[in-house]
Image (cartoon, coloured by chain):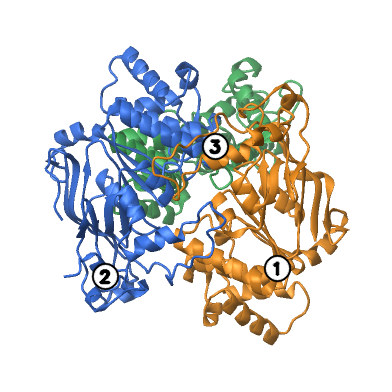
Chain colours: A blue, B green, C orange
Amino acid sequence: MTLSGPAESLIVIKDLKKWYPVRKGFLSKLGAKDEFVRAVDGVTLEIRKGEVLSLVGESGCGKTTLARLMLRLVDPTEGVITFKGHDLLTATKREMRKMRPQLQAVFQDPYASLDPKQTILQIISEPLSVNKLDKDRRETFNRVALALAAVGLNPPKSFLGKFPYELSGGQRQRVALARAIVIDPSLIVADEPVSMLDVSIRAEILSLMLKLKRELNLTYLFITHDLAVARYISDRMAVMYLGKLVEIGPAEQVCANPVHPYTKALLLALPTTDPNKRKVKIGIKGEVPNLTNIPTGCRFRPRCPYAFEKCMVEPELLRVGGDHYAACYLSDPPS
Amino acid sequence: MGMIGLSILLFFIVVAVLAPFIAPYDPNQVFVSDILQPPSWAHLFGTNEAGQDLFSQVLYGSRASLTVGFAAALIAATIGTLVGVTAGYFGQVPRELLMRFTDFFLVIPALALMIVLASVLGSSSGLTGIILAIGLVGWTGTARVVMSQTLSVKEHAFIEASKTSGAGALHILRTHVLPNVMPIVFAQAVLVVANSILYEATLTFLGLGNPNQVTWGQILQFAFVSGAITTSWWYVLPPGLSIMSVVLGFSLTGYSLDEVFNPRVRKI
Amino acid sequence: MLSVENLRTYYRTRQGLLKAVDGVSFALEKGEILGLVGESACGKTTVALSIVRLLPSAAQVMGGKILLHGDDLLSKNEGAMRDVRWGKISIIFQGALNSLNPVLPVKEQIAEAMHAHGSVSGAEVDTTITHLFKAVGLDPDRRTNYPHEFSGGMKQRVMIAMALACNPEIVIADEPTTALDVIVQRQILELIRNLRDELHISMILITHDLSVVAQLCDRAVIMYAGRVAEMGDIHGLFESPMHPYTRALLKSIPKMEDAKAQKLSYIPGSVPDLTGPVPACRFYGRCSHGQKICEEVDPQLEESSPGNYVACHFWRQISEA
């Protein structure tokens, strides 16, 4: 798969792997091979400056682990991550201190991601104080107030002294966004930022995120299991299954012309709000296999209705057309 | 339940603070003519074998006992919190090491260990010896509770958020873990005070305390040593009842605080 | 067959009396899947718990009737209710995946429910469970497994099997697919539809997910802040929603079938605090059509077309616009 030149990419990851050893009991340790949960098993992709890249997949596909690897919350087993050309894994402490503030995150649970014992002012100013940017109290205050205003919590002064329990879910998620933008990041990793919010509030937060992107020149990695949301908000969409990328391309294209049978299944399984479109069967049996027991060859082979002989060899990401790639032999143009 | 406990505590604390004003005599003052007298209007709790007023002794004794209780609990809570937080927050290796260290202290009977420490330190100046003996041994309960609380706090998303902002372990421990662990430390500490007062009474009774300090345990020890314990009920009853009530007060308060702060009952 | 009339259930909280359900009426026909739809704090779970009388101690039914074949469930004593529960109406609770006892094999847990409803011999229990497992798409040999040996989707199937164990007429399912992945969710929804077609069970499906409702339900009741906003046939509801809340809700969901650059609108503000003073129409304040009368006079449910009802003072004007 060809990647665009480094000038356009914010993050490039090559062949990233994260394997967790399975702890076995004492007796089974004798003579048994080590088992691994292969959460992320060789992912290569880039995040381009200014885009919204969504990462979709079901639970266990590795999308959350990938996000944590990118945020350097965990160390990879193998692979390379570069940010603006700098290798994140071999960076010195000093280099990391400069790069860290540029990579921020918003998490899924608006109730758990804010420390219940801190005031809103403390929560939002924490990134500043941790990075020693809070020397001038007045300036810190202003930056926090600006962040609050930017996320629509007005008047900012009235929110500073409040505690998380005094705010609604939607408001807390705005605080989480304010915290993420207060140190002027380049990239924000959003892990299911709206899944735990009421349906009628999601649109509000999504449009806020898009507004912030425009105003602050942000890039998003948007992780979700909700394909409709992903399609709405993202420029490009990447689909993961069992620790690997199975399809990636412009969001509209992936949804309109999916190539990989798993993507097709996901799109078909999506309940629509049109009661007339009910009868379609999806044709996929079974459930996602255990991450310690990954099928040989193409990972989706056992559940795929189109599997044929070639699928015994794991496919690479093959170009389908334009910027659209899929890890499936079905994307091979007939020769 | 907690309110009863709290009222008992407040009563004794007030008594201890106001002791110099309430006590009719200096506890060490000797009334040569009134040896081992039963309670009377002159001596509300009677006198001991040296002719000292027991009422004043018990009042002053409350100061000492409560001081030992609080001070020892402070030491125990500090050590316990440090050990618990470190074991809970950092990886498997530090946790295993610290837990084995804690187990060592748990396996050896606390009293035996305290006796050893007290006999070495006990008769030194003031009450320091006793305080150290109790504090250096009584931290294990707090350590375990704090460790399990830290383990659960560690998993919360706001810790990850903090790390993403670039916070180091020290900052996270200080700003996030500690404030969220403190409530349970507090509840534990109250119980530790209760235990400390009991241990103090026990150690002093066994003769390991400082004989120049008036504490309830010391009063009982003199009663025992002088043989008055079998004859003079007024000698034994007040200090005994006082110890019992104070311990009850702290225990009741501690248990209800625990109910309030225990994360299984209340979401963090 | 099941008729809820003017149900009012309140909770005693530290902040005061929470009017969680404040005058809710609807009916469930035989063999239909009725959706009870709304966002958080709309009262849908409270309605379900009121029907089976399993409310927490802080809650109390303050008024109304719940008629099962004409029999008022609210007037029954606990003993009579126990017969009704599971035997006539069974319920799959929200987060049911976690309500299986981890130390008992699943077969025992289902058997427990069956034994509580009449003496059945061990052999009968076993045959029924085998049958149930097959009906929900599980391998009957796995009935002796423990809950942790099942995946999320399979556990949900076990819960469905358990709910069907005593041949109820009505099954209430509270958010049965919320915690599940998309493909598994689809499988469970297909399963529910098949079971309804084969066993002619009536069902109340509680969810906040409008697309699940569109997929599965015949009719739906849209709830907002403890009241019914709109209810009726599913096609009518989605194609021509009447109530401003329903309309706004539908406009705030990204849809696959629309263009990518679709305009999503959202509803400003938030749900009113039901412990304090509330406007007569609960949606007043967030509604773009709200006027003085909405604040003062309770909107009643009016029939906008046969079988479809809406509680809004201005539904006619809105639908003509």
Q: CA distance from mark 1 to mark 3?
A: 58 Å
Closer to viewer: mark 1 or mark 3: 1
Residue A298: numbered disc: 2
Q: Which mark is residue C201?
A: 1
- Do callouts 2 and 1 point to residues on the same chain? no
Q: Nearer the viewer, residue A218 or B58?
A: A218
Chain of residue at mark 2: A
In the picture of the structure, the residue carrying the numbered disc 3 is B190
Location of residue A261 (image quadrant): bottom left
Q: Quadrant of the C terminus of chain A?
A: bottom left
Instruction: Give, as a three-letter code, the residue at label 1.
Output: Ile
Element marked by disc 2: loop
Q: Is residue B29 visible?
A: yes
Local packing at callout 2 (Cα closer than 10 Å; few below 14, some 14-19, many 20+) is: many
Which residue shows up at 32% across the image and 63% down it?
Answer: A242
Report, in whole angstroms, how far the alpha carbon at label 2 lies from the one at label 1.
Answer: 41 Å
